Amino acid sequence: VRTWPLVRELLLDDGSGQDVSRKFLVANSTITDGMSILNSSLREPDLKGMTEIHKNARVHIQNIDFQVSEAELCSHISAAGFPELPTVEISYRQDRRSNGHAWAIFRSEEVAKHMVEAGLPELRGRTMQVRMDVVSAVAADVGAEPSGGWVRCRQCRSCCVSLTDALLVEDVRLPRDGTPERVFHKKRGYFCIASESVLVNCDFLPHPDNAVMSFKLKKVLCGACDAELGNVQDSTVMEGAWSETCGSRVAHFKCEMVVLELTDCRTKHLELKRWSILGEAIGGRTMNRLSQVTMRQIIDSLRRSSGKGMRLIECQP
């Protein structure tokens, strides 16, 4: 039996290079009831897992009555006359309450597509929405050799900065100038930052709040469509020593204004509601270089999110 302390940024020495705390949190999931700590393949798809996705076709079913069980849904699909009985997986919360959506997994892609085209009869008075699971479709096309990747403008999809030069960091939100410490409550969060010097296709304007928040130096605008992408800020006043990595002036990208083109997925872009959602999905480390974040790494988080906190969108707006 091997034991490791549950501390951030400590990597397993078994050759996998996985973060210890992330492996524990992923293993202690509602899907496996915490029994997958010895088997990372249950939660983190590898190359073998990707080939399995080619063999199976997943259909996403939404608007399911919260009382419907997996067995009842499977029987309902069978009664609808489809020639193959699928494996059904309902999405559950930690307290085992249903999230109201599920996946039907077929061995035959033809049967899955037929179900999407035909739809399903009402179940317990609800009309269910049926579509092919885009996450699985993208996972099947994930490249074996990650390369490139960009932070892109959400509006026009112009490149803003290479993922190699972009960091996802945990730090403290900064107060207005002169705010007393007893009044300001420190709130930690995740930020996507990059050195001002490595930005591409970007324009800059003086920041209108600089007089009251002196750490905000400039506004960052997309050079192609003028969308506001974020701010250039003084990194020396941040809690982390990010000036040593990115210099004294860093761009902070607004999560709602950019999308990510991950290094191993060029067919879809990743859209997030908050940077903290991505930070938690990849293990909660203090610093993450975005070029090391892959579709394989977040595929399960994408499925659990079901488009609420993170989702895949088309490459063109």
Image (cartoon, rainbow, N blue to C red):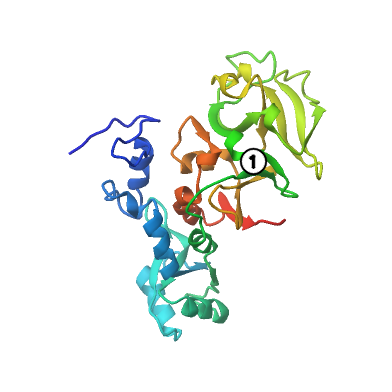
Residue most toward the left? 1
Query: Quick one: 240 or 180, which is closer to the camera?
Result: 240
Quarter of the image that includes the N terminus = top left
Q: Is residue 90 above or below residue 274?
A: below
Residue 175 appears anywhere in the view: yes
List the residue tagged with mark 1: 255
> Residue flagged by tag 1: what amino acid is it?
Cys
Q: Position of residue 129 (x, y in %)?
A: 56, 71
Q: Is residue 232 above or below residue 84?
A: above
Quarter of the image that includes the C terminus = bottom right
Residue 90 appears anywhere in the view: no
The residue depicted at 45 percent of the width and 36 percent of the height is 284
The residue depicted at 51 percent of the width and 55 percent of the height is 143
Q: Position of residue 186 (x, y in %)?
A: 55, 23
* Secondary element type, mark 1: helix
Label 1: how many residues lie within 10 Å, few (<14), some (14-19) or many (20+)?
some
Q: Is residue 110 above or below residue 170?
A: below
Q: Position of residue 44 (x, y in %)?
A: 39, 50
Figure label count: 1
* Residue 253, quarter of the rendered image: top right
Q: Position of residue 135 (x, y in %)?
A: 52, 60
Q: Tell whether 132 sits left or right of 74.
A: right
Q: Tell whether 295 sits left or right of 165.
A: left
Q: Tell whether 150 sits left or right of 63.
A: right
The residue depicted at 57 percent of the width and 39 percent of the height is 275
